[in-house]
């Protein structure tokens, strides 16, 4: 039974909320975490998409690897639908958000949040994005101890090499880029991805001749099969906490529950932040109202401190719907790492020569295990995808029409645009000889970009978020430059055909809508509401240079938890 | 002429979204319709699938007979309609099943509007053909007369012109977003995403292998076998696997901490970079950003 009074209530059990909950509970505070989506792999909810199940979970003994195996099938279409932002009930569609432009917002609901389908990539921010760009009120050095703590909890190590990474590294080296060895990246080059995925079992080496079962306990750690975007339950058969990918539900949630001071209530959508205002004073947060997504009942809980960790779209939405004091930056300054996809296709003979086999087999290995960094521009990553997700990311969307409408004669790519018809089928027939590179640019915060709400368009949780995003000229140039570098690397790696999607703005990484230094002070407490903190990616002051944001969001959440203890307990 | 068309389309789109936005009568009308999908919607979504993942006899000599069948051969359009109707909800339980907003009918209408706009602008390369929609249905499914009466302009366009019409919606959305006042214009780009992006994702995913995808997740069965999924046979995707013995090693070099031990292969003859058997780690380095130069200043 969920009580109605806690030291701290955390809104959202995504990538960052559980980090704050864990730190606060370790210090002895009582913490309630409210999560809008379901709790997968928990015995309180044996069929979380079909029935309401239990009310809350407070014990690590509730976690079940067996249930996670059953619920995370790795079937791509099923899992994308299961995990994307929407209610637990499988008969109901996604929660609607409006995103002008042809793009989409890819966020998950559920304990673990978007780390349920992130690919484990855990690099640090580029130091220059904090120390040279002028958006942040704190120095990069301040985050270093927290990065170390997070990386240890998430078991971050250099990712293993399979065929697709080897091909990329060959291309990057041949294009003249250096190998980077450092965690704090200040120059451009390539390196294995710092991944929060346990190392693969050495018996999975291609030379080891292993042909036993690729399941636990015969195999421990990563099993080198795509599955991260689909939740990744590998190795199958392993206990919950032995799953290879250290998404926040596997890394921080067990640690938080282990303290005995944390209760997690899924299927609980927070709709209001309660405040009290003494005469002539700023409002003080005193608790929240939330709605049970199965029963529709609204409940209330009081807390000494409220921590918003609902993500860079829902946190500002909640703020606005709760009618908290506005300032010109609440919801503004959205960055999404304005991205693109550049694909290489190879001839069998060319692959034979480079890899010793005629296929790349992108479905083998970790989804994203190799990267290229360029502080100031952003990053490139190799991406292995299953064919359906690959088709929609790489071919199904473009800001420049269909390939037959474009003539890229002088461009570094052979085709550009959306693919359909015989061209699509011909290209996807080469699925096993294809390597996709994700272009992730260091887009900068602009006030015009962000989240608003409008009373006219409401769902059961209030006015829905309306997201605006229009990249600047500089953002476009950075992305173009990275796409050009990607094409060069693919060519150097021997690709016979290079295709660029020219993707519409798609929000894979969403941040900086409640920016530290603009909406939040240096402890991430709101300037305008006392005892109200933000511990999610919305608190980031910019897009951390284009590096994957999870590590930085978690490090900042850990730091924020310490500041909460210093200030209020 | 074109501007007037754009304005008309915009008004139409506004109406659609205002309907779903504020639960006005329009949406109630949509929801109160029968369970059966209208013939117009069926024909239009077949025309979509036929353009996006067509039957391709021309690929037979090049790639083999496995690459001939397209989406219509596996009834993809039926599921796309179901998916589009069930996929989005505004949390209004009195509106249709579970508050989901059925979007297939309005999207089919919008595709016709786009087709007319394409014709109006002279952007089509082929002519409208009344027999195209008829050929999209199996013999005996509906009478040719009924089909001709129900079919809109979109399904009468050539495959490529249908794609051009979808492309026009992308463009239209950009023009629309410059207007202010009406906040909830439907962006045409979403239509493109749904009819092209989602059609491609569903087709190339495991979808075809389910007996019935709309069953509760715990009751869904999937054989995980390319024999049951046409698109897997066309891409060579072998199905989902618990793992692969695919480890080649770890990246490292002579002068760094990233790897150690025996070299398995050299990445580039010119450099000291190797793929090594044993893993290393990143260096916790001091950093210095004083040389940082902004490549593209804002």
Image: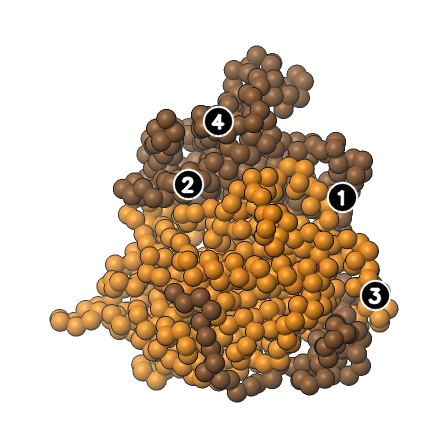
Chain colours: A orange, B brown
In this view, which residue lies farthest toward the top? B145
**Which one is in front in this view, the residue at disc 3 or the one at disc 1?**
1
Q: Residue at x 84, y 65 (%)?
A: A211
Taking the image as drawn, is residue A245 in sight? no
Which callout, 2 or 1, points at the residue further toward the start of the chain? 2
What is the quadrant of residue A493 in the picture? Answer: bottom right
What is the quadrant of residue A332 in the picture? Answer: bottom left
For label 4, the crowd category at 10 Å Cα-Cα, with few meaning under 14, some 14 to 19 and many 20 or more, is: few
Foreground of the two, A135 or A268: A135
Q: Residue at x 71, y 56 (%)?
A: A495
Which residue is disc 3 drawn over? A212
For label 1, the crowd category at 10 Å Cα-Cα, with few meaning under 14, some 14 to 19 and many 20 or more, is: some
Q: Chain of mark 4?
A: B
Which residue is disc 1 drawn over? B233
Which residue is disc 2 drawn over? B173
Q: Residue at x 74, y 72 (%)?
A: B268
Foreground of the two, A338 or A3: A338
What distance separates the C-alpha of mark 1 from that of mark 4?
39 Å
Which residue is disc 4 drawn over? B122
């Amino acid at each position: 039974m969920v009580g109605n009074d806690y030291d701290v209530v955390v809104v959202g059990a995504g990538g960052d909320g559980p980090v704050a909950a864990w730190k606060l509970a370790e210090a002895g505070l009582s913490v309630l975490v409210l999560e809008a989506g379901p709790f997968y792999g928990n015995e309180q909810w044996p069929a979380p998409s079909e029935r309401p199940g239990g009310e809350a979970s407070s014990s690590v003994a509730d976690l079940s690897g067996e249930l996670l195996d059953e619920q995370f099938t790795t079937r791509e279409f099923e899992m994308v639908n299961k995990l994307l932002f929407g209610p637990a009930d499988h008969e109901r569609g996604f929660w609607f958000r409006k995103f002008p432009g042809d793009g989409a917002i890819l966020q998950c609901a559920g304990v673990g949040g978007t780390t349920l389908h992130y690919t484990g990539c855990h690099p640090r921010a580029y130091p220059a994005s904090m120390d040279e760009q002028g958006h942040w009120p704190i120095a990069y050095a301040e985050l270093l101890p927290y990065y170390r703590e997070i990386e240890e909890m998430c078991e971050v190590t250099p990712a293993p090499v399979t065929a697709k990474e080897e091909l990329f590294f060959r291309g990057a080296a041949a294009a003249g880029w250096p190998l980077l060895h450092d965690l704090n990246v200040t120059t451009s080059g390539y390196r294995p991805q710092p991944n929060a995925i346990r190392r693969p079992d050495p018996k999975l080496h291609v030379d080891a001749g292993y042909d036993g079962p690729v399941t636990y306990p015969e195999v421990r750690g990563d099993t080198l099969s795509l599955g991260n975007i689909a939740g990744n339950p590998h190795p199958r058969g392993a206990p919950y906490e032995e799953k290879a990918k250290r998404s926040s539900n596997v890394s921080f949630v067990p640690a938080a529950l282990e303290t005995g001071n944390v209760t997690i209530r899924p299927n609980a959508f927070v709709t209001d932040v309660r405040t009290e205002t003494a005469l002539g004073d700023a409002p003080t947060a005193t608790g929240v109202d939330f709605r049970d997504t199965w029963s529709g009942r609204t409940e209330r809980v009081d807390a000494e401190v409220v921590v918003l960790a609902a993500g860079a779209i829902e946190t500002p939405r909640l703020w606005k719907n709760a009618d908290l004091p506005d300032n010109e930056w609440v919801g503004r300054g959205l960055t999404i790492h304005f991205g693109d996809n550049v694909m290489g296709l190879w001839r069998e003979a060319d692959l034979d020569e480079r890899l010793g086999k005629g296929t790349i087999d992108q479905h083998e290995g970790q989804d994203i295990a190799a990267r290229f960094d360029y502080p100031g521009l952003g990053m490139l990553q190799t991406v292995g995808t299953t064919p359906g997700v690959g088709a929609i990311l790489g071919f199904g969307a473009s800001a420049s029409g269909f390939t037959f409408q474009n003539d890229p004669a002088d461009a570094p790519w052979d085709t550009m645009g959306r693919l359909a018809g015989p061209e699509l089928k011909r290209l996807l027939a080469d699925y096993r000889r294809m390597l996709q590179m994700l272009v992730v640019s260091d887009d900068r915060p602009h006030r015009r970009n962000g989240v608003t709400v409008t009373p006219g368009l409401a769902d059961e949780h209030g006015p829905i978020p309306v997201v605006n995003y229009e990249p600047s000229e500089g953002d476009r140039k950075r992305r173009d430059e990275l796409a050009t570098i990607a094409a060069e690397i693919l060519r150097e790696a021997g690709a016979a055909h290079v295709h660029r999607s020219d993707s519409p703005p798609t929000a894979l990484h969403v941040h900086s809508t409640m920016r530290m230094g603009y909406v939040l002070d240096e402890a991430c407490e709101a300037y305008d509401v006392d005892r109200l903190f933000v511990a999610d990616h919305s608190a980031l002051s910019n897009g951390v240079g284009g590096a994957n944001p999870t590590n930085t969001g978690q490090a900042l959440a850990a730091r924020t938890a310490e500041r909460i203890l210093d200030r209020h307990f | 002429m074109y501007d007037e068309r754009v304005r008309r389309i915009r008004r139409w789109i506004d109406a659609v979204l205002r309907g779903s936005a504020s639960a006005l009568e329009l949406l109630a009308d949509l929801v109160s319709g029968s369970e059966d999908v209208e013939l117009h919607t069926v024909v239009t979504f077949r025309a979509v699938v036929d353009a996006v993942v067509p039957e391709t006899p021309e690929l037979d000599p090049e790639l083999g007979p496995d690459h001939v069948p397209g989406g219509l051969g596996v009834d993809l359009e039926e599921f796309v309609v179901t998916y589009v109707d069930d996929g989005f909800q505004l949390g209004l339980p009195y509106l249709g099943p579970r508050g989901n907003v059925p979007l297939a009918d309005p999207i089919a209408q919008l595709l016709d509007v786009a087709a007319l706009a394409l014709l109006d602008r002279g952007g089509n390369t082929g002519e409208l053909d009344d027999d195209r929609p008829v050929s999209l249905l199996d013999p005996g499914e509906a009478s040719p007369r009924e089909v001709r009466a129900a079919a809109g302009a979109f399904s009468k366009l050539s495959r490529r012109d249908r794609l051009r019409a979808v492309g026009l919606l992308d463009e239209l959305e950009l023009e629309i977003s410059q207007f202010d006042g009406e906040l909830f214009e439907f962006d045409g780009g979403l239509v493109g995403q749904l009819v092209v992006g989602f059609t491609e994702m569903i087709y190339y995913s495991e979808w075809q292998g389910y007996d019935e995808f709309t069953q509760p997740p715990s009751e869904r069965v999937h054989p995980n076998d390319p024999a049951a999924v046409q698109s897997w046979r066309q891409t060579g995707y072998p199905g989902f696997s618990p793992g692969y013995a695919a480890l080649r090693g770890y990246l490292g070099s002579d002068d760094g901490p990233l790897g150690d031990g025996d070299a398995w292969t050299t990445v580039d003859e010119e450099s000291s970079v190797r793929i090594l058997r044993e893993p290393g780690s990143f260096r916790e380095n001091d950093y210095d950003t004083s040389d940082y130069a902004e490549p593209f200043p804002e």
